[in-house]
Amino acid sequence: MDTSSPYAGGVAWIEGEFIPAEDARISIFDTGFGHSDLTYTVAHVWHGNIFRLGDHLDRLLDGARKLRLDAGMSKDELAEITKKCVSMSQLRESFVNLTVTRGYGRRKGEKDLSKLTHQVYIYAIPYLWAFPPQEQIFGTTAVVPRHVRRAGRNTVDPTIKNYQWGDLTAASFEAKDRGARTAILLDSDSCVAEGPGFNVCIVKDGKLASPSRNALPGITRKTVFEIADAMGIEATLRDVTSHELYDADEIMAVTTAGGVTPINTLDGEPIGSGEPGPMTVAIRDRFWALMDEPSPLIEAIQY
Amino acid sequence: MDTSSPYAGGVAWIEGEFIPAEDARISIFDTGFGHSDLTYTVAHVWHGNIFRLGDHLDRLLDGARKLRLDAGMSKDELAEITKKCVSMSQLRESFVNLTVTRGYGRRKGEKDLSKLTHQVYIYAIPYLWAFPPQEQIFGTTAVVPRHVRRAGRNTVDPTIKNYQWGDLTAASFEAKDRGARTAILLDSDSCVAEGPGFNVCIVKDGKLASPSRNALPGITRKTVFEIADAMGIEATLRDVTSHELYDADEIMAVTTAGGVTPINTLDGEPIGSGEPGPMTVAIRDRFWALMDEPSPLIEAIQY
């Protein structure tokens, strides 16, 4: 890898041009900033293979359609640009972001939503861990916030991946104040929603469950469910109550930016044994094995 | 006014430099974009006077404090830069935006909130109307959305002015689909919250009321309350139920980007007489008169 290349720190595609990621800037009048009016996805590249790009693009385009956003490009075109960002960067492990925004108009601050030109921004940068890597191995800590709930589907549609993180950011600060790494937010019905950037799965009596509402339909979670199925583990999307969360044998945080991370303690008290549980460990190891195993899930980047 | 000046379309202050507004761009890695992690305010200049800038800055800095954001500048410094943006633009009527974001880190996509350098962005552009000006005079139309509620204070603190507009944008599209200009959102308790970019005040039996929770404490609304007080009208911040909204004698939408706009119909049915009501008209006219009247509320821009 040529680290003197201007692209070594990552590559962005902004308004039709490939540029070094560090130079990537967007108009302050883009309503993706000005009203967080956008959808996005984060895919990852591991050992030179991009994982489930098709699934990421399907969800991105579905979210855009629900928001009445026109990406102006086909799934194939988006895939080509994405892969070119990665190959130009020469990154073998990369965090890849695609965002479709409502964009901006000819008139600065245009308020008529029909007069805005939608924008697509794509970048590939070095892989980012949502949790420090050692915590993915040895487990991490979480709290249930006392002061904030996750916005419900009657306000912001959680099936459209979004940056409306006010509740998640407040929860992150509360976790830090209480000496924990992260937070698991409940919804207004006291059912589990999600954490800042991850889905939550619980294990009880050998069965796996994850929230059916007020949570992103995560691609990593989808993979976890497929792994569970292949292992003969019953896995269900359904309401998961706060009682079930605290009483779980195992809790895992699942996300593209970190795979499958065991949560050892909740509000300072151990979950199960207080060590990574056997099902979490088995699924986590299988998840990472998939990154190197020839299958339709991965595609080698042509560097 | 020299329209050939590069600043004639507005001026922005971005990372320490005054530039033409149309060139204003921010890093794609700013978490103000990437997690909508910010607070902002919009003030306005009318006939060369800036209105209640001190109140706007107080609310901005209060919101920043609640978010643990450090603007890195005093209220006076922010005021000076803001007024310089306006004077450089030569705009006599201007829409002025100040935003404080969590910013970005040395590492692209940095996830540790403590490693980000907070940013302040300021711009002054030609005045924007939230509603077409004729609708401010003759009244406009609204619906109560069927499909979306305003996120409540248990998710995103509405006293921190924010861009988490997913619910408001969905409501705007629903209004358009149903042939109305805008929407008035209820909260999850079926009390009035706010609309896309405006506070709601109702009038019933000569008394004025506006929601005490799940709505921004708007500077225009504060002004409306002060005007009402000076006119001897009882005005109260309290819960306003959906019943009270539909049964109101008058409804007004109040915002910096439009002053006081009568809402003539709700869900296609007339409010009161279906024409702008007498109290709305009196308060609206008094509001605009304040823009030219020497008082501590206004400050002349030194062009």
Image (tube, coloured by chain):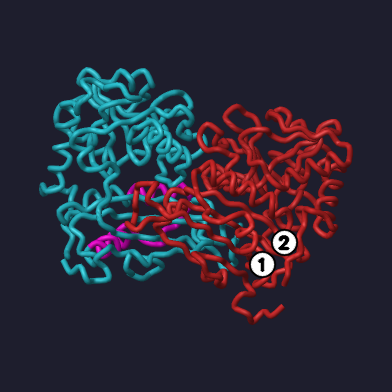
Chain colours: A cyan, B red
Of residues A284 and B248, which is closer to you in this image?
A284
Mark 2 and mark 1 on one chain: yes
Query: Which of the two labelled residues, at mark 2 and mark 1, occupies the earlier sequence position?
Result: 2
Q: Is residue B72 left or right of residue A285?
A: right
Chain letter for mark 1? B
| Residue depicted at x 57% and y 48% | B173
Q: Tag on residue B142?
A: none
Which residues are the magenta region? A58-86
| Relative vertical location of residue A156 with respect to residue A54 in this rendering, above or below | above
Where does label 1 land, which residue? B86
Give the dominant element type of the magenta stretch: helix, strand or loop. Answer: helix
Chain letter for mark 2? B
Residue at the left extreme, as displayed: A293
Of residues A42 and B143, which is closer to you in this image?
A42
Q: Tag on residue B45?
A: 2
Q: Where's residue A211, x and y in %?
A: 35, 29
Q: Is residue A74 magenta?
A: yes
| Residue depicted at x 28% and y 47% | A55
Label 2 with label 1: CB-CB less than 8 Å: yes
What separation in Å lies between label 2 and label 1 (alpha carbons)? 8 Å
Label 1, secondary structure: give it: helix
Density class for disc 2 (Cα within 10 Å; few <14, some 14-19, many ≥20) is: many
| Residue depicted at x 27% and y 22% | A270
Q: Classify the position of the N terminus of chain B by image quarter.
A: bottom right
